[in-house]
Image (cartoon, coloured by chain):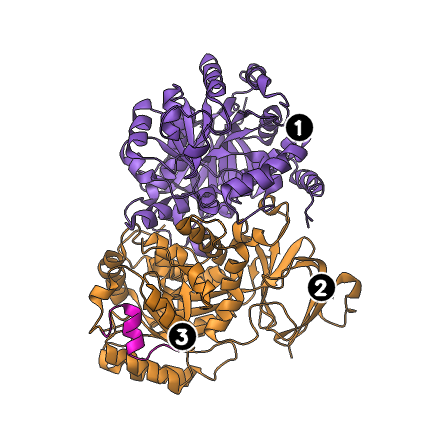
Chain colours: A orange, B purple
């Protein structure tokens, strides 16, 4: 039985539609939120773990809708170049020689440390040797959707592309019942690296196991020209023609869409995850997130991998989601702070298909973070806008995931951070570049 | 006599054109950098203050080219609206009733705390009751160019606009010899709030006292339509016709320029300071910073005030300067990390007219910051790109300004932060909104 946790005297951010609540308490029970209220009604202490939330803000843990966690190893290795050159001349070659089960385990664990220390409690990952990623995220104490990669050329752990679907099925069978925090998924790299047949087989597998299906799509302007056997006149119409779009499909990026594409996505009920920092850094463009939200398309938020961002801090991502929409439309009302907060919390929970996650409400999952408001950049605190425009991940002091404390006063409780950093530094020295 | 400071075992970032240097030492003398070198040549300890820089990165302190420090009071008060509405319906009315000498002193000091804690050692400020801002920045231990505001309507401390030039002259006389860290300047608000006559009188005064002259210009698309008595067909041509442009003029924003405007700026040798976070948040647009840099125009970086950003962390600003140029041009090479680092260090020093500032070199000013590399988001460390794309202000552990230590292990040594936050919270309660 988990010890209940009682957080007292805190400022509560429950969800983007509700004003901040001063001087509140919150009680967890098992892996969920039991109740909360103003301090006048604070429950008597009955052997619960107490956290004094004075001067702090309590909010739902952030949800990262797209990451390649193990790519922490490649952070900063190849910056300031466009997507094709970056992928083909640097990332794919580095992956061909440096991705191993050991690398995926330790580099994913480093990503988990960075995410927990910046307030992320759930991550959707997509990579190879994904059983190692799943194990690392489980060991780190996170909630996760680790999705096994599929690509039509030799890949880490899957040297023969003919066997990529079988490899993923074995992974799903192994992980689908292992732990309530882990929901395994499928990550088909893209319509320019997977054939129509592979994409259809991957989606069939996803339907068989009710697994979420992720795919990069419409990231760059050039994508239509490099599709494998195009079935339609745009990357989205290609996927639609292959019957890949439904409510369990997550479309990553979606920068280059036209009106017809958006209509197709809307009708399919597929989710969209945008990654503004990565899309800016690779010069992909600015997704039309506000228009998609206005149409009722669920638009969530991800960091992408650390090699193209180069940070896993979702607070930065919320800020750029909102500001990017404003500058793209030259309209400062295009994306208010609350919509960016929703994208990184409850909308991502919906897109990833995890029920009762992403807001503070009785019966919802106890994935919670505390931020220290008692700092110059968070003063004065008039409203929750400061979570988007002023806060950053380093303001997070405590993290609770699934009713368990994993970060206490910025100290990781779930695993040894020094060991993880040492392992990653050792792996980094095997790359040609000098690592300090 | 100042105690020399010896920093040992550190990774050194000297300037954007030089690779990181591992295992180095650096020695200060008086207010400057005496020498540095590899650890094999470390000087013997002769009563110097020692700082162990192991696991840390030592770099020049960042320079904020544009701020309205006292506006920390208005942080988060009015977000998600366009410049005109924000300024006329919220900021100007709040300023009319809530700006006092006391407010400027404490709210500037809060900004100083935020800046020091995020690695900024020099700031160019522009506001009213500027003697209070100058005093607060001096008391906080910062290097600063506090510039006194000029505007053609009743302003805080200058109820009669007819007297605005006299007020500024009195301020310059009072502050120009007070301390080597403070260089007073003039801040004419804009060509749409100052008449041609006022602008010319302000620039004459700047020339008389060799004071830097700052002005907001070409921030929004609409500016040409609201100029006071336009002298030319663009805001820049208006300023040029009034003979306001020279090497001691700093043009803030410069988002809406045409080729002729850029040519005029280039020939005038005026500096440009862009404020990407603010320009995104107010939906002003993305300045053509890379094109201006390619022309040899010195382009620096500022945060703008906290009401339109809402953070004074220059690490965020460098990141968005680089990424904003990439996404604007759809060219990932448009602005490499090194150019963003230069904008926030040595280019800003040049624009602000402060000699021997902004890089680590013998004889340069000892304005230095240390960052803790021993954190998940800064691992691995292949090169200095991580200062732009991965670091944030909270990574700063120690700050030295003018040869004196003002931050030690994230504790402010120069003033009482708790007192400052209390004073600002008290002032915030006098605003209509509820402050937590």
Residue that label 3 marks: A267
Query: Residue at horizontal 27%, vertical 52%?
Result: A81
The label number, if any, that marks residue A25 in the structure image: 2
Answer yes or no: is residue B113 visible: no
- Please tell me whether mark 1 sits on a helix, a strand or a loop: helix
Relative to A264, say whether B415 is above or below: above
Q: Is residue B280 left or right of residue A45?
A: left
Q: Alpha carbon of mark 3 to alpha carbon of mark 1: how far?
A: 58 Å
Q: How many marks?
A: 3
Q: Is residue A392 left or right of residue A12?
A: left
Q: Which residues are magenta?
A: A231-246
Q: Is residue A98 magenta?
A: no
Residue that label 1 marks: B101
Q: Chain of mark 3?
A: A
Q: Alpha carbon of mark 2 to alpha carbon of mark 3: how far?
A: 41 Å
Q: Chain of mark 1?
A: B
- Please tell me whether mark 3 sits on a helix, a strand or a loop: helix
- Asked if badge 1 and badge 2 are on a common chain, one would say no
Instruction: Name the spot of residue B6 as percent of width and height, x first.
Output: 47, 34
Q: How would you rate the neighbour count of disc 1 (Cα within 10 Å): few for under 14, some for 14-19, many for 20 or more?
A: some
Q: Chain of mark 2?
A: A
Q: Quadrant of residue B94?
A: top right
Q: Quadrant of the N terminus of chain A?
A: bottom right
Instruction: Name the spot of residue B285 as percent of width and height, x first.
Output: 40, 44
Q: Alpha carbon of mark 1 to alpha carbon of mark 2: how far?
A: 39 Å
Answer yes or no: is residue A211 visible: yes
Tell me which numbered mark, 2 or 3, is placed earlier along the sequence. Answer: 2
Q: Is residue A45 left or right of residue A331?
A: right
Q: Nearer the viewer, residue A74 or B75?
A: B75
Query: Residue at horizontal 29%, vertical 79%?
Result: A242
Q: Is residue A245 magenta?
A: yes
Q: Nearer the viewer, residue A212 or B408?
A: A212
């Amino acid at each position: 039985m988990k010890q209940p946790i009682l957080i007292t005297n805190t400022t509560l951010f429950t969800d983007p539609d509700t004003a901040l609540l001063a001087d509140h308490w919150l009680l967890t029970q098992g892996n969920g939120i039991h109740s909360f209220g103003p301090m006048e009604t604070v429950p008597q202490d009955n052997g619960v773990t107490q956290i004094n939330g004075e001067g702090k803000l309590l909010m739902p843990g952030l949800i990262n809708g797209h990451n390649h966690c193990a790519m922490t190893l490649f952070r900063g290795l190849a910056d300031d170049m466009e997507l094709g050159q970056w992928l083909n001349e640097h990332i794919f070659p580095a992956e061909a020689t440096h991705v191993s089960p050991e690398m995926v385990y330790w580099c994913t664990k480093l990503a988990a440390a960075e995410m927990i220390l910046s307030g992320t409690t759930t991550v959707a990952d997509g990579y190879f040797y994904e059983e190692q990623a799943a194990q690392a995220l489980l060991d780190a104490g996170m909630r996760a959707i680790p999705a096994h990669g599929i690509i039509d050329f030799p890949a880490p752990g899957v040297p023969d592309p003919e066997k990529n679907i079988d490899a993923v099925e074995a992974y799903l069978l192994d992980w689908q019942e292992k732990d309530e925090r882990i929901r395994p998924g499928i990550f088909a790299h893209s319509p320019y690296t997977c054939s129509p047949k592979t994409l259809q087989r991957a989606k069939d597998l996803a339907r068989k196991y009710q697994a979420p299906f992720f795919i990069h799509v419409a990231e760059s302007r050039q994508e239509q020209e490099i599709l494998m056997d195009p079935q339609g006149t745009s990357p989205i119409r290609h996927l639609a023609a292959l019957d890949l779009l439904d409510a369990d499909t997550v479309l990553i990026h979606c920068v280059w869409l036209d009106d017809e594409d958006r209509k197709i996505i809307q009708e399919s009920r597929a989710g969209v995850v945008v990654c503004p920092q990565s899309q800016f850094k690779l010069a992909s463009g600015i997704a039309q997130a506000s228009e998609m939200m206005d149409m009722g398309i669920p638009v969530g938020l991800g960091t992408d991998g650390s090699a193209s961002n180069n940070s896993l801090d979702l607070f930065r991502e919320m800020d750029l989601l909102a500001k990017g929409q404003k500058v793209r439309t030259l309209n400062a009302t295009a994306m208010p702070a609350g919509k960016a907060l929703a994208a990184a919390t409850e909308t991502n929970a919906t897109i990833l298909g995890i029920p009762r996650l992403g807001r503070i409400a009785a019966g919802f999952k106890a994935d919670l973070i505390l931020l220290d408001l008692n700092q110059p950049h968070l003063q004065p605190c008039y409203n929750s806008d400061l979570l988007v425009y002023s806060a950053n991940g380093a303001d997070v002091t405590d993290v609770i995931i699934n009713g368990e404390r994993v970060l206490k006063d910025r100290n990781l409780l779930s695993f040894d951070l020094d060991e993880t950093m040492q392992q990653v530094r050792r792996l980094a020295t095997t790359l040609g570049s000098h690592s300090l």
